[in-house]
Amino acid sequence: MSAVCGGAARTLRTPGRHGYAAEFSPYLPGRLACATAQHYGIAGCGTLLILDPDEAGLRLFRSFDWNDGLFDVTWSENNEHVLITCSGDGSLQLWDTAKAAGPLQVYKEHTQEYVQGSCVVK
């Protein structure tokens, strides 16, 4: 994964993880959130990486694991520490970078699906 911070390209290797979305923090200059997945998002887990620039490139500030691939990430408009990710299992995860564990909350919908007038409970 590469990012341009202050005009210079910076790189961090993430073995076994492939980046799907990256977003710079609107609050902290250079802080980058990256949603990743294993096996190109086809199978496996996901990791939210929070990265900060340093002299050598990018350094890992914090990481959070999830049981499915993470495919998008966005920062909160109201709190500099809060992010939301979405994953392949159809859920949204609310994370707080000020806390080492997470997520704070998981939102999962579509517990019932309707197929041609009948209800299939999943």
Image (tube, rainbow, N blue to C red):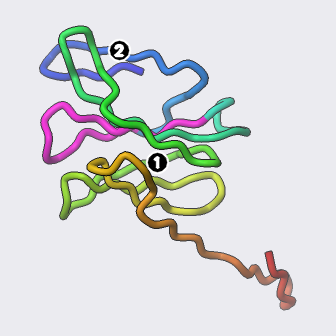
**Quarter of the N terminus within the rendering:** top left
Q: Is residue 54 above or below residue 64?
A: above
Q: Is residue 39 left or right of residue 20?
A: right
- Image point (18%, 31%), residue name: 30
Does residue 28 belong to the magenta stretch? Answer: yes
Q: Is residue 11 left or right of residue 44?
A: left
> Where, by quadrant of the figure, is residue 33 drawn?
top left
Q: Is residue 121 above or below residue 19?
A: below
In the image, what residue type sits under mark 2?
A: Thr
Mark 1 lies on a secondary structure that is: strand
In this rendered view, identify the residue nearer to me: 101 or 2.
101
- Image point (60%, 75%), residue name: 109
Numbered label attached to residue 100: none
Q: Label 1, on which residue?
A: 72
In x, y percent, where is residue 13?
A: 45, 16
Q: Label 2, on which residue?
A: 11
Q: Outermost residue, bottom direction?
A: 117
In x, y percent, where is residue 32?
A: 29, 35
Please report the bounds of the magenta region as a residue range: 22-37
Does residue 46 belong to the magenta stretch? Answer: no
Decide: few, some or many residues near mark 2? Use Cα within 10 Å; few <14, some 14-19, many ≥20.
Answer: some
Mark 2 lies on a secondary structure that is: strand
**Quarter of the C terminus within the rendering:** bottom right
Marks 2 and 1, the one that precedes in the sequence: 2
- Image point (15%, 17%), residue name: 7
In the image, what residue type sits under mark 1?
A: Asp
In x, y percent, where is residue 24?
A: 25, 39
